[in-house]
Amino acid sequence: MKGSTIGAVFVGLACAVAACKGDPTASLRGGPTSLSLTPNVMFIDNGGTKPLAVQALDAQLNPIDFVVSAESADPSVATAVFDRILPNYTTSVFTVTGVGASADSTYIRVHGGALKDSVLVIIN
């Protein structure tokens, strides 16, 4: 009786392993549903630069390949220029440069397809 119980446990484990082969939620992944911007707020000195990393995320919050662009709402305060795509091809990096006077602020608007988000930039 003990042997048949152990056998049943092994068969159950084998079935569980076979059922978990692959990603069971892969069919839920679609295109991008949101943008993730890092950082959310930037404090930059006049003439200083900081990187802005952007990822497009699917419904499960997995980063996916997606083309985005960025522009400043007020280029006299700050500018954003495409810098590079990281080796994983899911993160675009923009260089934000502060060009305004102290206490000036603007937004860097990021968009790709129908997705939009922004980062507040404040000049120190």
Image: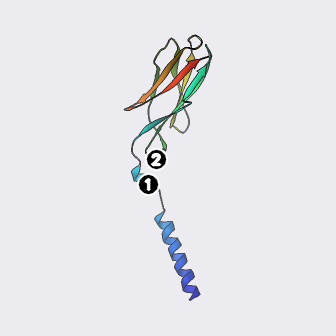
The disc at residue 60 is 2
Residue at image x 40%, y 51%? Answer: 28
Quarter occupied by the N terminus: bottom right
Where's residue 72, x and y in %? 47, 19
Relative placement, left or right, of 105 versus 68 is right
Mark 2 lies on a secondary structure that is loop
Q: Residues within 10 Å of mark 2 (few under 14, many from 20)?
A: few
Instruction: Name which residue type carries label 1.
Output: Thr
| Residue nearest the observer in this picture, 34 or 16 | 34
Classify 32 as above or below 109: below
Does 76 appear above or below 16? Answer: above
What kind of residue is marked 2?
A: Gln
Question: Badge 1, how many Cα within 10 Å: few under 14, some, many 20+?
Answer: few
**Mark number for residue 51?**
none
Q: Is residue 58 left or right of residue 2?
A: left
Residue at 44 percent of width and 32 percent of height: 67
x and y percent of residue 57 in the render? 46, 40
Q: Residue at x 46, y 65 (%)?
A: 19
Q: CA distance from mark 1 to mark 2?
A: 9 Å
Q: How many marks?
A: 2
Identify the mark nearer the N-term, 1 or 2. Answer: 1
Q: Quadrant of the C terminus?
A: top right
Q: Left or right? Give the position of 70 relative to 42.
A: left
Residue at the outermost left position: 114
State which quadrant residue 69 falls in. Answer: top left
Residue 120: x, y in percent? 52, 23
Q: In the structure shown, which secondary structural element does the residue marked by tag 1 occupy?
A: loop
What residue did someone put label 1 on? Answer: 25
Q: Position of residue 73 (x, y in %)?
A: 45, 18
Is the C-beta separation of discs 1 and 2 under 8 Å? Answer: yes
Closer to us: 65 or 53: 53
